[in-house]
Amino acid sequence: MKMSIRGPVRVRFAPSPTGFLHVGGARTAIYNDLVRQNLGGSLVLRIEDTDRERSDPAMTRGIQEALAWVGVAWDEGPHLQSERLERHRQRAEELLTAGAAYPCFCTPAQLEPLRQEAQRQGRTFRYPRTCLSLTSEAVESRKKAGAPWVVRLRMPDDAIRFSDLVRGEMEFAAEVLDDFVLLRSDGSPTYHLSVVVDDIDMEISLVLRGEDHLSNTPKHVALFRALGAPLPRFGHLPLILGTDKKRLSKRTGATSVEEFRDQGILPEALYNYLALLGWSPADGREILSRAELIEAFDLERLGTSAAVFDPEKLLWLNGQHLWKLPLSELLERLEPFLEETGLPAAAGTPELGVVAGLHQVRARTLKELAEQLRPYFEDQVSWDETASREYLAKEAGLADLLAELAGRYRQAEPFAKEELERLLRELAETRGVKAAALIHPTRMALTGTTAGPPLFDVVEALGRQRAVPRMEDYARHLARLSPQEVGAPAEGG
Ligand code: GLU
């Protein structure tokens, strides 16, 4: 049976700074943020940097930046685990003194054949407790002789049970657990020791982490008990799979928070999306702000099945959040993407607000939006050659018709969408063609594509100076592409 939790809670997010913040880690951080905000209490940020070789201070900074960007608010820390090694050792010494842990002199060379044998027989390797029965004299004389030794926890002889917030009652038989190492022969604490001592000292009341840690939890439970500390509650979040149903990896696209940021995903959309990977509100809403997610969050509704990370769904959700942004906010967020697209001059111009507003509902990311704005601020557009050649150039007389429309637009007064629409429809009618037959090439001429916001908004936003010459150029281009001209020498212009 799952049991609920009342606040306030003390939760933690404990990343290892060995790489960028991955969406799996971000999801864990977000769930801890949601619980803490929903129930009250504190979220502690702890950097588990004890693996000196793989940890990188730049990553520690990067992870904090990525957390802050996505909207996770921690109350304490970052605490660096590497600064607490002495404390971890001290707690292991206490266990040694109390007889709850013991020194082990077995060398890796001695244990390796046993490990291999266990593997051959398809069972879990368990340390055979060779050194558990050593007398204190034997221990002392081996230490004096300089033999290397590690410290192992003496595991209880019974099964380990705990209740998991996601998976309910868990039981691990004693046979699958062994007396694991707390201190290595160089005196350094293992991950299991550091994490438990820190969770005790930081008074963590709920450990909410990824399912990949589930097999560690019985060890941690035994260690909490040996250290005489109350058990926190545990919750293990289901794995995140890629669309190929395998564990999420680079194979199926971006995986780090930084990559999504650089693609123009909004932080609130990523937060929203990740919050729904393993939980959903009772009323089925999908588009929620952080505040709404916090309000709706309920630990009792955590799901057990693996969640699939679907980039298309994220893009859709991002589009929804993008669409909701007030224009001033949109422009602010868009600025770095405009700069990246090479359109710095556009930022802050009045037209920018107009055209960004026109395209706001059509872009799924800030990057896409910036790309869509190119035709408004660049002198040249590149026309879709396939569509031009395959469809538009095959319409007899279209080039002339477009040139004629350009002429009328040159004289249009005012150069405003209602008048521009009237002129186009009038021309279509006098020539006996459908308005659509003129709308498509005009859009292509002006924006290089066959889809976009309402055409007359686009023409008005471009303005006479840009729109008319572009239509004339494209009319000439179409004339060159027309079947009767194929094979003729290309003209300039
Ligand atoms: N440092 C561990 C990791 O990055 C997390 C440990 C924990 O949450 O207990 O996977």
Image (spheres, rainbow, N blue to C red):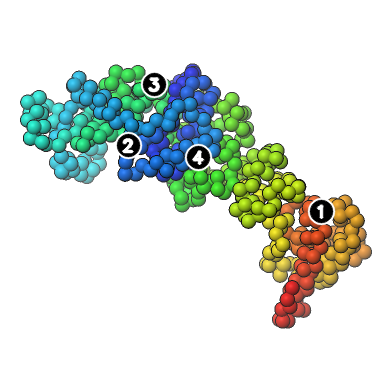
Residue named by callout 4: 66
Residue at mark 3: C-beta within 8 A of ligand 1: no
**Relative to 400, 49 lies left or right:** left
Residue at mark 1: C-beta within 8 A of ligand 1: no
**How far is mark 3 from mark 2, CA to CA?**
20 Å
Are the residues tagged 3 and 1 within 8 Å (C-beta)? Answer: no
**How far is mark 3 from mark 4, CA to CA?**
26 Å
**Relative to 292, 145 lies left or right:** left
**How far is mark 1 from mark 4, CA to CA?**
40 Å
- Reply above or below: 293 against 107: above
Residue, x 45% and y 27% (percent of image)?
76
10 Å crowding of disc 1: few (<14), some (14-19), many (20+): some
**How far is mark 2 from mark 4, CA to CA?**
21 Å
Q: Amino acid at mark 4?
A: Ala
Going from N to C along the chain, the mark reached first, 1 or 2, is 2
Q: Quadrant of residue 100?
A: top left
Going from N to C along the chain, the mark reached first, 3 or 1, is 3
Residue 150, given in percent of the width and then of the height, sits at 19, 33
The outermost residue toward the right is: 430
Residue named by callout 1: 460
Element under disc 2: loop
The N terminus lies in which quarter of the figure? Answer: top left
- For the question of whether residue 237 can be seen, the reply is yes
Residue named by callout 3: 203
Residue named by callout 2: 50
Given residues 490 and 248, the one toward you in this image is: 490
- Reply above or below: 106 against 366: above
Q: Which label was assigned to residue 377?
A: none
Are the residues tagged 3 and 4 within 8 Å (C-beta)? Answer: no
